[in-house]
Image: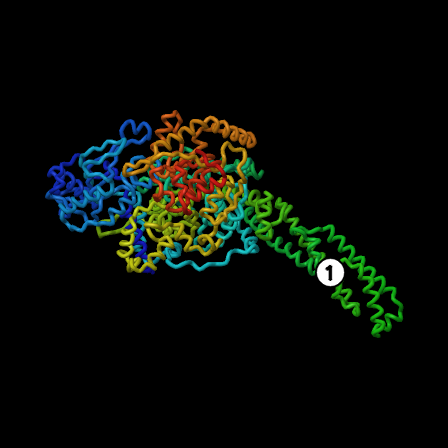
């Protein structure tokens, strides 16, 4: 059953999302009127525009219901409509456009109202102005330069609601008061530097206002009508903590290694923490999920590629359907990083590692919006209405199939030397080979476990022998041979002695003094024994014989175990053994030694992934031939839709989309009869269909955006970091609390325990994230001092001096720097440059012109030196890798980060004024470097001498400075006013200043 608590949560997120989707309104895409004559004081609109607006909406509503004739008796007359009124528009001046590149017309402030057919307007029930989030600070979109206000000011205004019911006069005063509080200006006197304000009334019908979140909202609506909560969604939204399980032991990890079957990359093996995270994921059952905390530069992409590769191989061995895997995140930049990683996988030379079908590249399929421009090398599918089109649909025809089949057969023959096999037979042969290799991996683990018993067997052979003969899990076979020879010699001497005993001693050996005499002599012989012998009863000859039998049997067993393990290693091209504990793992990693797991991942498991890839290519040919033959390419019933995604997965195993787009793609068509005479087509979601949901950058995804998509999947791995970029929370705290009560998620805000618990676990739309919720639902907790879930710890991006700050600031020292101390650099790895100037604000954003000029001058001074230095490094690397070197530009080398959009504009202006090329140069907030890195990062703090002893935006948490610093590979340079960093305290910025100071790199 759909538990009432689940339903309440879904309603809460659904309606919060609907309220929070403050998208920029595209006027021309809605029913609208420009230059509308209005009397704001009285609340009236001129008759002509009233008629045009209401009749247009009336026509739209009736046409949606199949009515086209106004004379139809069922024609629905509309007497009022919900509208939005923009009193003014904003456009950038030509000079501003020259520096910022910004163009267009913006409507940052809309008044909500209800328009009556009589021409009067009254307040709408949701009476706070509609203010698109895109023009508010903190800014997350670096393509945006015009800033209207900031979220804090809007939230403060929202906290004082209108209480005048339908009284327009009072409402109009409220609107003007809100505007003043939000902008600091009167409504009809608003200006913005570098922009023109045009006061002309624009009105749109808001009833048909669509937003980016409509597909998610539709999915929530569908889920609220379901009878039960699906297993994965149920686990994810459960308010309680998932019971913890013990972490896998080293023996468990060894066993799991035989279920790790595929690896997408060959240049580097998995790190220790990546491998542990993967092996814990492999134990997930349907309806379960795993959170993986991924600090900066710790290889989240490599882990996700390994997860996908493993699913591909395992499904090929199973022989059923391929896995449908969806990787999601919250914005286009995040998903672009994912799709790029799956589209540019570096491959070994050789036919096995090439695709065997024409025009098939990479292992990811992008699912963007219809309007999204996609790079030419990225395979994608777009949805137009109910039709999917793009990379894979273009191949579903007889001409392509004929060419593809010939190429596939030719490639298999060239690779294997086997001729005249059908596609089906080739697929079967590849699968058989995969099954054999899986069995070999399982046999390897069995033999390794057997081999490890040698330690105990040597102890049994002779205490202490394990130390001498089994050093570092390596059997000294020569010494074992010597021991065996010595034991046999001893056995021969005992035998000789017994054979030469006199007849009388043998006859009267039952007498005690005779026994004593014999025992003394035997002990004398055993003094030369290479093994411990005190357990022998020398008074009993059978005991001595048994001793030799058992010891020689042990030696044979030890030798057999060793030979079997070494034979397996030789057959599978493995030279080393698995480390037996974390100490050995870390020692091997520290010494850059490849070991058992590394060798498998860069060899056999890499090969298995490409074999499985070709298996699925063959299966795609068979499935698509049948599809084309039966002319079912456009069918979209539930079975057809599922089979379509499974076919797509045969070519590109990972689908990549934003949370906003995913629900639009994973639907099917269903004819629903609404009356005897009429049926309508519906598009229900493919619930519980996706085999694996991957969430990347989950720390940036607010819960209402991501939660619904879990209903589409069977299990999930969620990767992110709550200590880096946070979600863009579009809901004011007080509104969020009101929604908690309204939708019965909490019974009272005064009950702080409930609200605090929801906040801690990430459920709140004003403070939560998908990552926090996943941590709550994760059954493993790798490090008690950090959040629940597994954690990636090996950092390879930054020099040790750079990541050392982040490690201390955010990660309790758990990160393991692997790049080493700074070397061969132009600048110190951490540096501060003092800019003693004042900042300015225009009520919307902060800037510091002198600091911007200082940074531009620094770039101008060093740009040629930077380009020469890094071009030399690139040329050297290209020579070693036998490829053509890339021509580097300044944009490849430096990134400039600032907390404020206003400072971004000043920086661009300063750079252009000094002739510095800004095309492609990253200048913006930390979001501009999301998922990216640069050799040099310059940070403009912006605050000046006039801001001493104030609170600073970058000190609201560890997140901003953690992100900014960790994007710098070789050097991080902080530009700012030293006076703001010299106060007492332990804020992130003060820690940063003192950390740099400890490196003695403070400059005026």
Residue lying at the far bottom in this picture: please name it.
511
Percent from the top left, x then y, of residue 709? 36, 49
Q: Nearer the viewer, residue 100 or 806?
A: 806
Report which residue position mark 1 lands on.
Answer: 551
Rendered location of residue 910, percent (x, y): 36, 29
* Quadrant including the C terminus: top left
- For the residue labelled by badge 1, is the local secondary structure a helix, a strand or a loop? helix
Question: With 375 as the anchor, is 348 left or right in this view?
Answer: right
Q: Identify the residue at the far top of this view.
A: 915
Q: Nearer the viewer, residue 381 or 674?
A: 381
| Residue 600 image point, x, y percent | 57, 45
Vertical position of residue 855 compared to residue 457: above or below? above
Location of the N terminus by quadrant is bottom left
Judge left or right: residue 798 versus residue 508: left
Horizontal and vertical percent for residue 154? 26, 44
| Picture colour scheme | rainbow
Residue 898 visible in rendering: yes
**For residue 233, which quarter of the picture?**
bottom left
Q: Is residue 75 visible?
A: no
For the image shown, how many numbered marks are present on the structure?
A: 1
Q: Residues within 10 Å of mark 1 (few under 14, many from 20)?
A: many
- Most foreground residue, 685 or 144: 144
Report which quarter residue 920 is drawn in: top left
Q: On the rendered structure, is 352 left or right of 779? A: right
């Amino acid at each position: 059953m759909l538990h009432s608590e689940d339903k309440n949560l879904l309603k809460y997120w659904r309606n919060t999302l609907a309220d929070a989707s403050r998208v920029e309104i595209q006027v021309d895409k809605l029913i609208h009127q420009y230059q509308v004559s209005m009397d704001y004081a009285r609340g009236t609109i001129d008759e002509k525009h009233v008629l045009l607006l209401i009749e247009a909406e009336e026509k739209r509503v009736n046409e949606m219901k199949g009515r086209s004739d106004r004379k139809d008796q069922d024609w629905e007359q509309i007497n009022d409509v919900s509208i939005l009124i923009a009193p003014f528009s904003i456009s950038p001046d030509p000079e501003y456009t020259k520096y910022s590149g910004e163009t267009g017309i913006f409507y940052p402030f809309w008044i909500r109202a209800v328009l009556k057919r009589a021409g009067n307007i009254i307040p709408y029930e949701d009476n706070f102005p509609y203010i698109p989030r895109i023009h508010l600070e903190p800014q997350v979109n670096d393509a945006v330069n015009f800033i209207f206000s900031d979220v804090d000011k809007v939230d403060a205004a929202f906290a004082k609601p209108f209480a005048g019911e339908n009284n327009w006069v009072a409402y109009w005063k409220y609107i003007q008061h809100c505007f003043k509080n939000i902008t600091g200006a009167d409504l009809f006197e608003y200006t913005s530097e570098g922009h023109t304000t045009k006061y002309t009334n624009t009105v749109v019908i808001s009833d048909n206002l669509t937003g980016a979140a409509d597909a998610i909202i539709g999915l929530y609506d569908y889920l609220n009508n379901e009878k039960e909560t699906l297993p994965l969604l149920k686990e994810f939204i459960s308010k309680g903590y998932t019971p913890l399980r013990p972490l896998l032991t080293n023996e468990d990890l060894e066993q799991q290694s035989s279920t790790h079957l595929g690896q997408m990359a060959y240049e580097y093996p998995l790190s220790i923490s990546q491998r542990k995270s993967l092996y814990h994921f492999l134990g997930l059952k349907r309806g379960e999920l795993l959170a993986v905390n991924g600090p900066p530069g710790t290889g989240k992409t490599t882990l996700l590629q390994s997860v996908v590769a493993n699913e591909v191989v395992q499904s090929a061995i199973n022989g059923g359907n391929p896995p449908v895997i969806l990787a999601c995140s919250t914005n286009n930049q995040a998903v672009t990083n994912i799709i790029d990683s799956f589209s540019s996988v570096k491959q070994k030379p050789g036919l096995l590692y090439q695709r065997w079908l024409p025009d098939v590249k990479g292992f990811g399929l992008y699912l963007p919006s219809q309007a999204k421009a996609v790079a030419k090398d990225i395979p994608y599918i777009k949805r137009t209405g109910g039709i999917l089109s793009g990379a894979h649909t273009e191949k579903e025809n007889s001409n392509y199939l004929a060419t593809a089949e010939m190429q596939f057969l030719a490639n298999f023959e060239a690779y294997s030397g086997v001729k005249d096999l059908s596609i089906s037979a080739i697929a079967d042969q590849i699968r058989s080979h995969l099954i054999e290799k899986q069995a070999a991996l399982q046999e390897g683990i069995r033999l390794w476990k057997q081999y490890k018993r040698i330690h105990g067997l040597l102890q049994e052979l002779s205490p202490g022998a394990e130390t001498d003969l089994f050093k570092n899990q390596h059997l000294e076979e020569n010494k074992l041979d010597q021991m065996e020879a010595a034991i046999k010699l001893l056995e021969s001497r005992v035998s000789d002695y017994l054979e030469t005993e006199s007849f009388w001693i043998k006859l009267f050996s039952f007498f005690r003094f005779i026994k004593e005499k014999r025992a003394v002599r035997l002990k004398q012989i055993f003094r030369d024994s290479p093994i411990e012998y005190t357990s022998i009863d020398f008074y009993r000859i059978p005991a001595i014989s048994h001793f030799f039998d058992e010891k020689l049997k042990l030696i044979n067993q030890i030798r057999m175990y060793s030979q079997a393990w070494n034979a397996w290693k030789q057959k599978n091209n493995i030279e080393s053994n698995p480390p037996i504990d974390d100490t050995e793992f870390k020692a091997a990693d520290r010494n850059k030694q490849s070991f058992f797991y590394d060798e498998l991942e860069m060899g056999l498991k890499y090969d298995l992934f490409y074999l499985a890839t070709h298996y699925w290519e063959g299966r795609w040919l068979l499935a698509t031939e049948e599809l084309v033959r039966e002319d079912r390419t456009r069918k979209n019933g539930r079975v057809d839709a599922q089979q379509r995604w499974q076919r797509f997965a045969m070519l590109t195993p990972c689908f990549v989309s934003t949370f906003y787009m995913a629900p639009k793609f994973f639907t099917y068509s269903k004819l629903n009869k609404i009356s005897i005479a009429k049926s309508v087509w519906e598009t229900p979601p493919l619930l519980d269909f996706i085999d694996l949901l991957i969430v990347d950058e989950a720390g940036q995804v607010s819960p209402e955006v991501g939660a619904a998509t879990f209903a589409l999947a069977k299990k999930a791995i969620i990767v992110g970091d709550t200590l880096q970029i946070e979600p863009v929370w579009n809901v004011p705290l007080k509104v969020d609390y009101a929604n908690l009560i309204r939708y019965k998620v909490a019974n009272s805000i005064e009950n702080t325990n409930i609200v605090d618990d929801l906040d801690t676990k990430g459920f709140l739309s004003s403070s939560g994230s998908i990552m926090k919720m996943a941590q709550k639902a994760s059954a493993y907790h790798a490090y008690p001092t950090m959040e629940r879930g597994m954690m990636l710890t090996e950092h390879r991006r930054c020099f040790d001096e750079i990541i050392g700050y982040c490690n201390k600031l955010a990660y309790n020292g758990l990160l393991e720097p692997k790049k080493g101390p700074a070397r061969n650099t132009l600048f110190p790895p951490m540096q501060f440059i003092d800019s003693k100037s004042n900042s300015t604000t225009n009520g919307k954003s902060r800037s510091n012109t002198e600091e911007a000029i200082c940074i531009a001058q620094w770039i101008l001074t060093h740009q040629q030196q930077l380009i020469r230095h890094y071009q030399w490094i690139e040329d050297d690397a290209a020579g070693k890798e036998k490829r053509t070197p890339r021509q580097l530009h300044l944009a490849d080398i430096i990134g400039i980060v600032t907390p404020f959009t206003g400072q971004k504009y000043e920086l661009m202006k300063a750079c252009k004024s000094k002739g510095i090329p800004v095309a492609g140069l990253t200048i913006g907030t930390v979001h501009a470097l999301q998922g990216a890195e640069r050799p040099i990062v310059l940070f403009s703090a912006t605050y000046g001498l006039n801001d001493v002893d104030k609170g600073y935006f970058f000190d609201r948490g560890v997140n901003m400075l953690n992100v900014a610093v960790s994007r710098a590979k070789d050097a991080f340079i902080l530009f700012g006013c030293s006076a703001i960093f010299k106060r007492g305290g332990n804020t992130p910025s003060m820690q940063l200043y003192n950390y740099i100071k400890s490196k003695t790199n403070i400059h005026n």
